[in-house]
């Protein structure tokens, strides 16, 4: 891999935290500066820009922007001068990223080399670029700095080259406020859960919905709150299983002229040696000893019915109660209410039953930058997932009752979480990270909600949060990044529905992922996939998470385990059609 140097920015005033030395704040047993240095440990040379820190080892260069506190652009200029001319790539990193990993820096370097871009920056799970987590070509960085009249108090956007790229990475949430530091420490104290751990918690710990009696045809997506038993027998009477002839005794038979139709009048009883034409599903007459299929007989000129030689002897009569007797179990408690269950219940005279659900959801889209209708203004982007979420939720039996947009206000989430809610599930998209506009976690904590999933050990989707309010409503906080939101919802929705309704656990679709090695990393990943000609799937190694364009011609998603090898068994999540 191409060699890189590193500039770590460890100065700044931290005015939002009362002037505290942010890089020295300890989270998870190490300072944020130590976390940054660990992330760039493989770089050839590293310079720390900020106040002198005697505790740093001598191989770490130190310098200071002039004047002190004159902004990140000035600090980057001082750092580049201190490095001198060496490696062709330069990592630029802020020292307020407690969860950034060396793997993420390696990914940025790799993408810079492959893309040919002048600079590549990380994006958080909401899709927002983080310009102080990036890799530059040294020549491009030097040219950008030289192109400015002054470096003092310049915004970072003044430095960004036209030929730059942005990729989503885990662990890029920064700490700019005391609240974000508290959240980061809480996240360390409560480790992120694997997807399987989170699913099991949701199935076992979410409060069950209240059971009630309902017409089964109106509650698809619910689950049975009690076993469902047959009221009537199936079949209700002896019926023909085939088109043919009801016969009495051994043939040949004298064929009568009347005919038995399904739903029609039952033919009068047969005497020994008689036969009557009959249709599938028709009530066979008394005296019937069997039904002979059309293809097994011939009718002679004298209206005598003869069995053809060498044809099998079959009964072809479905006897009363052959499939179900009154009181027989049709489906156990927890069975989802599907078309198959509705049909099976109706066939034994059951149209209503005790159920839980279906889960009713309210969708809350967040962010001033999101606009669903009308022309876009500066800084706005189109809501590309809000309109499709009701259809996606319905795939899992969840009914959407409402969809609203929440502006970025100091108390917006408090009002949403404490208002009377006529729903079982709040699906909140965005504001789950640790940035300045990501306020959902703090609002959830203020309600004293029961947090079931604080974070996931998953990429994308790591910032997902699931909690239960005192009212019993489930809060599902999804990342604002469109692909992360959809992928995480698809991965968690079945377990969430099972937890609320008491439904039985779905069996996962499992199979081999033929190119797992080029996709897998240190944590599980969800990526688009297509069916492979030889069976199993082929996943997409590189995805753009800021939109759903990568799903247009794909068959579903695959959940790739950490450090998986080619041919590893993975779970497949089919895309709704």
Image (cartoon, rainbow, N blue to C red):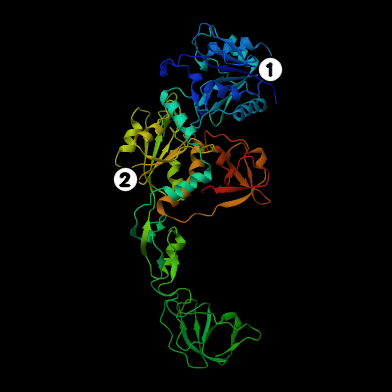
- 147 up-or-down from 563: above or below: above
Characterize the local packing of mark 1: few (<14), some (14-19) or many (20 or more) Cα atoms within 10 angstroms.
some
Q: Residue 422: in sight, yes or no?
A: yes
- Label located before the other in sequence (2 or 1): 1
Find residue 6 and report its horizontal and vertical position in percent: 62, 18
Q: Residue at x 30, y 38 (%)?
A: 419
Q: Nearer the viewer, residue 177 or 266?
A: 177
Q: Residue at x 48, y 87 (%)?
A: 257
Give yes or no for contact between labels 2 and 1 (Cβ–Cβ under 8 Å).
no
- Image x and y of residue 138, in percent: 64, 16
Q: Residue at x 52, y 23 (%)?
A: 32
Secondary structure category for the residue under label 1: loop
- Tag 2 residue: 422
Q: Which mark is residue 329?
A: none
> Does 468 sit left or right of 528 as displayed?
left
Residue pointed to by mark 1: 87
**Callout 2 crowding tier (Cα within 10 Å): few <14, some 14–19, many ≥20:** few
Point out residue 518 in the picture as x, y percentages from the top left corner. 66, 38
Q: How many marks?
A: 2
Q: Position of residue 402 (x, y in %)?
A: 36, 43
Element under label 2? loop
Residue 397 in view, yes or no:
no
Quadrant location of residue 345? bottom left
C-alpha span from label 2 to label 1? 59 Å
């Amino acid at each position: 891999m191409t060699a890189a140097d590193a500039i770590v920015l460890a100065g700044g005033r931290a005015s939002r935290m009362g002037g505290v030395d942010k890089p020295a704040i300890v989270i998870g047993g190490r300072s944020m500066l130590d976390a940054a240095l660990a992330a760039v440990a493989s770089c050839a040379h590293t310079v720390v820009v900020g106040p002198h820190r005697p505790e740093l080892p001598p191989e770490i260069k130190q310098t200071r922007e002039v004047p002190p506190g004159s902004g990140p652009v000035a600090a980057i200029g001082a750092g580049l001068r201190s490095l001198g001319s060496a490696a062709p790539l330069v990592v630029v990193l802020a020292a307020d990223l407690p969860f950034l990993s060396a793997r993420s820096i390696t990914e940025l370097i790799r993408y810079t080399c492959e893309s040919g871009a002048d600079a590549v920056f990380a994006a958080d799970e909401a899709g927002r670029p983080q310009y102080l987590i990036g890799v530059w070509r040294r020549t491009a960085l030097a040219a950008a700095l030289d192109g400015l009249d002054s470096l003092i108090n310049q915004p970072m956007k003044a430095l960004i080259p036209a030929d730059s790229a942005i990729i989503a990475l885990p662990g890029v949430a920064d700490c700019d406020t005391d609240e974000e530091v508290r959240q980061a420490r809480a996240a360390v104290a409560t480790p992120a859960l694997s997807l399987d751990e989170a699913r099991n918690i949701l199935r076992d710990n979410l409060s069950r919905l209240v059971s009630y009696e309902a017409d089964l045809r109106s509650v698809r997506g619910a689950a049975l709150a009690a076993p469902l038993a047959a009221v009537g027998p199936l079949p209700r009477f002896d019926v023909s299983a085939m088109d043919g002839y009801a016969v009495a005794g051994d043939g040949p038979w004298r064929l009568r002229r009347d005919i038995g139709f399904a739903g029609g009048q039952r033919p009068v009883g047969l005497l020994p040696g008689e036969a009557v034409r009959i249709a599938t599903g028709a009530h066979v007459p008394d005296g019937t000893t069997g039904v002979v299929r059309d293809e097994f007989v011939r009718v002679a000129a004298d209206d005598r019915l003869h069995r053809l030689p060498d044809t099998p002897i079959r009964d072809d009569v479905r006897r009363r109660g052959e499939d179900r007797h009154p009181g027989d179990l049709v489906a156990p408690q927890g069975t989802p209410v599907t078309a198959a269950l509705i049909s099976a219940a109706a066939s034994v005279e059951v149209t209503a039953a005790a159920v839980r659900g279906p889960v009713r959801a309210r969708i809350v889209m967040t962010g001033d930058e999101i606009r669903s209708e009308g022309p876009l203004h500066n800084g706005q982007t189109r809501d590309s997932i809000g309109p499709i979420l009701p259809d996606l939720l319905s795939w899992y039996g969840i009914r959407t009752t409402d969809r609203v947009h929440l502006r970025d206000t100091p108390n917006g989430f408090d009002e949403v979480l404490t208002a009377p809610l006529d729903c079982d599930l709040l699906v909140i998209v965005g504001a789950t990270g640790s940035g300045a506009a990501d306020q959902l976690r703090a609002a959830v904590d203020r309600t004293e909600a029961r947090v079931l999933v604080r974070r996931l050990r998953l990429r994308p989707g790591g910032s997902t949060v699931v909690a239960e309010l005192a009212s019993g409503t489930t809060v599902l906080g999804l990342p604002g990044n469109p692909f992360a939101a959809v992928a995480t919802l698809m991965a968690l929705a079945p377990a969430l529905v099972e937890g609320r309704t008491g439904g039985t656990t779905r069996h996962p679709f499992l199979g081999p992922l033929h190119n797992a090695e080029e996709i897998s990393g240190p944590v599980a990943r969800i990526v688009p996939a297509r069916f492979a000609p030889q069976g199993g799937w082929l996943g997409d190694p590189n995805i753009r998470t800021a939109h759903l364009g990568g799903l247009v011609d794909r068959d579903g998603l695959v959940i790739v385990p950490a450090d998986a090898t080619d041919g590893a068994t993975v779970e497949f999540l089919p895309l709704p059609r």
